[in-house]
Amino acid sequence: MALLELKNVTKYYNNATPALSEVSFEVREGEFVSVIGPSGAGKSTLLRCINRMIEVSGGEIYFDGVIASKLRKRDLRKLRTKIGMIFQHYNLVDRLTVLENVLHGRLGYKSTLAGVLGRYSEEEKKQALEIIKLLGLTDQVYKRCDQLSGGQKQRVGIARALVQNPKMILCDEPIASLDPNASKIIMDHLRNISREMGITLVVNLHQFNVALKYSDRIIGVNKGMVVFDGAPEDLSAEQISDIYGSESGDLIIEPGEKNAS
Amino acid sequence: MTQIEESIKGWGRLKEKGHINDGMDLSAVKPLNKSSLAMRIILLFLSVLTIYALFTIDYKSIDVPKAFADTISNFKTIFLHPYSHRFSLWEAFYEVVVTIGLAFLTTLFGAVIALLFGLLAAQNLAPKQVTNMIKAFVAFIRAVPTILWVLIFAVAAGLGSAAAVIGMTFHSVSYLTKAYSESFEDLDRNVLEALTASGANWWQIVFQAVIPSSATYLLSWTFLRFEINFANAVAMGAAAGAAGIGFDLFMASEFYFDLREIGLITYLILAFAIALETISLRMKGRLHKRT
């Protein structure tokens, strides 16, 4: 059964051109889906419509058996706890420690007062520490986040998403600000999360060769429309130029080397 | 041949044009536009007014050099022979503590209320209508000086410390609301987005992300307001009968005409102001070390 299903999702920012038009696709549980496309194609909008950071203008979104696009405030909060999110600029509170930032992922489960006071249970702290260890940040637990490198910050971002015990994680350009080494570490962590924890991943990516290498499935978006939806092996050079526009031809290195590493 | 000559002339003309353009670019560094012209006219007007005023002041029968000499000798008495006939140094010290108490209380009240208002006035935390309303309201309060608010509240509370507390709190709230809300607005919208996406609610985001991120600014603004309130509290003692050292200063100068006492009180206030400044600098330094 599909964990996530989009049906004719449409989004207008102003009345002129749609940012998303009639987007429909399904994501199965445990799938690693990459969304690729040029800047301004609507990738970020698409991702934010799923957890309702942006309200859709039309169409429906089903997540885990509920109609996400119709939820009221309290249920929406509950839905969001089940969907983690990772950002290009990490979006951490720089003045707080790694552990505090990671524990922010638990706020959605807590009462207002407990969250305000920052009271976390022993179990939550243990879980947070375990995840931090898993991501190799044990030495940084009590460091403030502004003392970390970009790659470390993104791992904190991943830890914050994981501590939510999410069914799905949305990643908005997770490696766009990182150097190749840090990018590889982050992508490897994401693959482990998908394979070993069975968490569904929807990842916006600029680098389509990374998408080819890591994902189970690729969705190509251009001008708010899905122009490709299928396995990485099926993505031909022609379709890539469909997604990115004809100018991209020179940049394309032979696609289809999915399992290179 | 003629064609070539003409074309050479043409080059020359072009070159000339180029030169003219260069000249214009150089003068364009500071062009004489409307605003700079207006500025010059205003400066000229003000200097003319000043010179005119100096020549037309009615000095009455005051002998200016003698007046200067008298003022200097008064200052000498004030600052070189501070002494009090009415109260001991210990009593004066106590009165300064009362004044500091007034400043502390109004800053504390102001800070607590302004924290809430500041959150509601920050554009990244509250809807636009609410922020605009609060910002307008607060700007109106700020436009009226503290002493006027104290006198306005004196109508209801009577001249004295109650009116001073209410009036000074009022003005502190408006000042700190503006300062706080601007510190909150500095916070990256992305951080708020991340916490909202994880299911946190407004209060949790405020206390877990917004306040920790802007704590340094909040503290330094509050200290600044405390210093302002200390000065205000002295003035309120004199003008609104709010007790404290200000009232003694008022009595010494206006009622007893005791220059030496004025000197003593001035030195006391100065000493406390310096102490406050030092403490606040130390605390800020410690905060910066942590950042």
Image: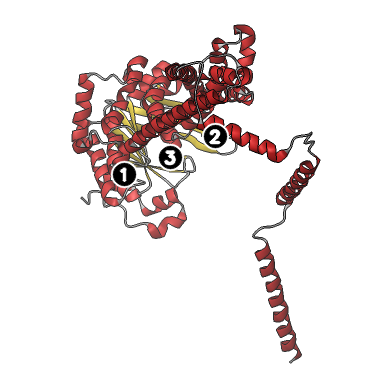
Cα distance between the residues tagged 2 and 1: 32 Å
Q: Do dots 2 and 1 share one subunit?
A: yes
**Secondary structure type for disc 2:** loop
For the residue pair B256 and A20, the one nearer the viewer reads as: B256
Q: Which numbered tag is attached to residue A96?
A: none
Q: Which residue is mark 2?
A: A13
**Vertical position of residue B90 compared to residue A10: above or below:** above
- Extreme-bottom residue of the structure: B1
Q: Secondary structure at mark 1?
A: helix
Quadrant for the N terminus of chain A, please.
top left
Residue B203: % across, % down: 41, 20
Please state the horizontal and vertical placement of residue A41, each as a whole percent of the image. Answer: 47, 43
Q: Are marks 2 and 1 in contact (CB under 8 Å)?
A: no
Q: Amino acid at mark 3?
A: Lys
Between discs 3 and 1, the one toward the N terminus: 3
The local secondary structure at tag 3 comes to helix
User: Residue beneath label 3, please?
Assistant: A43
| Badge number at residue A150 | 1
Numbered disc in front, either 2 or 1: 1
> What is the crowding at mark 1: few (fewer than 14 residues within 10 Å), some, or many (at least 20)?
many
Pointer 2 and pointer 3: residues touching (CB < 8 Å)? Answer: no
